[in-house]
């Protein structure tokens, strides 16, 4: 627990799957069914990917992110991807996103995956947490290119 917040893998609380799918859908407007399918696969599959993580305060979801094969971009060779990183507005600027990213990188390394990618329009945020700019990538249905970052655990 960090400052009253707890980061969990959805596998630790599978009963929260629908709540988590609804929460991510509300934040990112990706079809609900995509989250439901991916979360179900994370709960029932043996593979390291996909995985879904929540940051909880009490019983409330205040942040979350996932790890999926491809976060809707043209660089299918850059996988897996951290996706859907989100922290509720009142909880921002408290290091929650950085803690989530560190937790996920450590958890994925424990699952045998030491290199992760993410696509974003932010240009300085992820560097604070050890991510490095890797290349530009074309998001599906996007007009302009987005920044692709890489993180490698040693």
Image (cartoon, grey):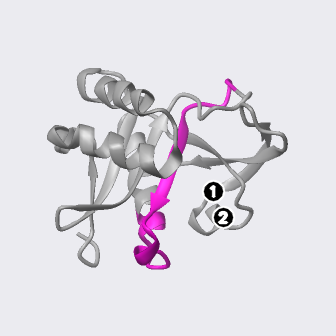
**Is mark 2 in CB contact (under 8 Å) with mark 1?**
yes
Q: In this view, does 140 lie to the left or right of 114?
A: right
The answer to whether residue 150 is above or below residue 139 is below
Question: What is the distance, in whole Å, between disc 2 and disc 1 at their CAs?
Answer: 5 Å
Callout 2 secondary element: helix
Question: How far from the left and from the top, in percent, is residue 140?
Answer: 71, 31
53 and 144: which one is in front?
Answer: 144
Q: Mark 2 highlights which residue?
A: 127
Q: Is residue 149 visible?
A: yes
Q: Quadrant of residue 78?
A: top right
Does residue 115 show up magenta in the picture?
Answer: no
Res. 131 mark: 1
Q: Is residue 86 left or right of residue 81?
A: left
Residue at image coords 66%, 64%: 127
What are the residue bounds of the magenta stretch?
76-99
Callout 1 secondary element: loop
Q: Is residue 36 left or right of residue 145?
A: left
Question: How far from the left and from the top, in percent, is residue 36?
Answer: 34, 30
The answer to whether residue 103 is above or below residue 25 is below
Q: Quadrant of residue 139?
A: top right
Residue at image coords 28%, 73%: 2
Does residue 78 show up magenta in the picture?
Answer: yes
Q: In this view, does 1 lie to the left or right of 76?
A: left
Neighbour tally class for label 2: few under 14, some 14-19, many 20 plus, Cα within 10 Å: some
């Amino acid at each position: 627990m960090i400052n009253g917040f707890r980061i969990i893998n959805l596998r630790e609380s599978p009963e929260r799957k629908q709540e988590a799918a609804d929460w991510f859908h509300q934040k990112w407007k990706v079809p609900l069914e995509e989250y439901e399918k991916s979360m179900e696969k994370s709960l029932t599959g043996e593979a390291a990917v996909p995985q879904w993580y929540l940051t909880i305060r009490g019983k409330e979801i205040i942040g979350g992110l996932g790890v999926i094969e491809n976060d809707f971009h043209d660089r299918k060779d850059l996988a897996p991807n951290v996706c859907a990183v989100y922290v509720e507005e009142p909880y921002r600027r408290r290091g929650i996103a950085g803690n989530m990213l560190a937790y996920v990188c450590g958890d994925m390394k424990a699952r045998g995956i030491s290199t992760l990618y993410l696509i974003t329009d932010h240009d300085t945020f992820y560097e604070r947490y050890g991510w490095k700019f890797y290349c530009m990538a074309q998001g599906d249905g996007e007009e302009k290119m987005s920044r692709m970052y890489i993180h490698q655990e040693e």
